[in-house]
Amino acid sequence: MALHEFQEIKKAEDEALELIKNAENQAKDIIKNAQLEANEKFKNTLQEINAKAKNIVDSAISSGEKEAEIILARGKTEVEAILNIPKTKLDSAVKLIIERIVNSNGNS
């Protein structure tokens, strides 16, 4: 009878060890899955952040290009205005400058 009780105790211990082993394996699987899920979420979050950053940069570039176009158009208009000054105005401006330079140097 003691042998039978010893065998029952041994069987209970073996079952307990098997339960512990299964629990440890489940814990490892849970940790592994949690790490994989965390890595996937991190990767997705990083992709979202990069996409948002790219949108911000693209928007800033587009805005800068629009401002540059406005400034360039204004500059072209001013250049055209200068280039289209009537010859009579240029001649009288040249004459006025020459008179002031000659008169101020006393070479009149």
Image: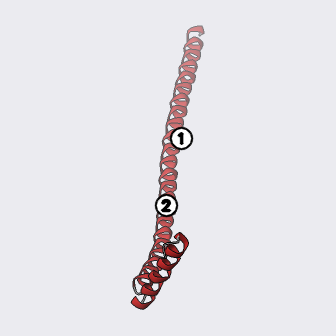
Camera-nearest residue between 75 and 56:
75
Q: How is the image coloured?
A: secondary structure
Q: Identify whether 40 is placed above or below 80.
A: above
Q: Identify whether 105 is placed above or below 12.
A: below
Camera-nearest residue between 5 and 24:
24
- Quote the CA–CA distance across marks 1 and 2: 34 Å
Residue identified by numbered label 1: 34
Camera-nearest residue between 7 and 17:
17
Question: Closer to the N terminus: mark 1 or mark 2?
Answer: 1
Residue type pointed to by label 2: Val
Residue 68: x and y in percent read 47, 71
Quadrant position of the N terminus in the picture: top right
Residue identified by numbered label 2: 57
Report crowding for label 1: few under 14, some 14 to 19, many 20 or more residues within 10 A (C-alpha): few
Q: Quadrant of residue 2?
A: top right
| Residue drawn 50% across the image and 73% down it | 101
Observer-side mark, 1 or 2, equals 2
Report crowding for label 2: few under 14, some 14 to 19, many 20 or more residues within 10 A (C-alpha): few
Q: Quadrant of residue 69?
A: bottom left
Determine the secondary structure under disc 1: helix
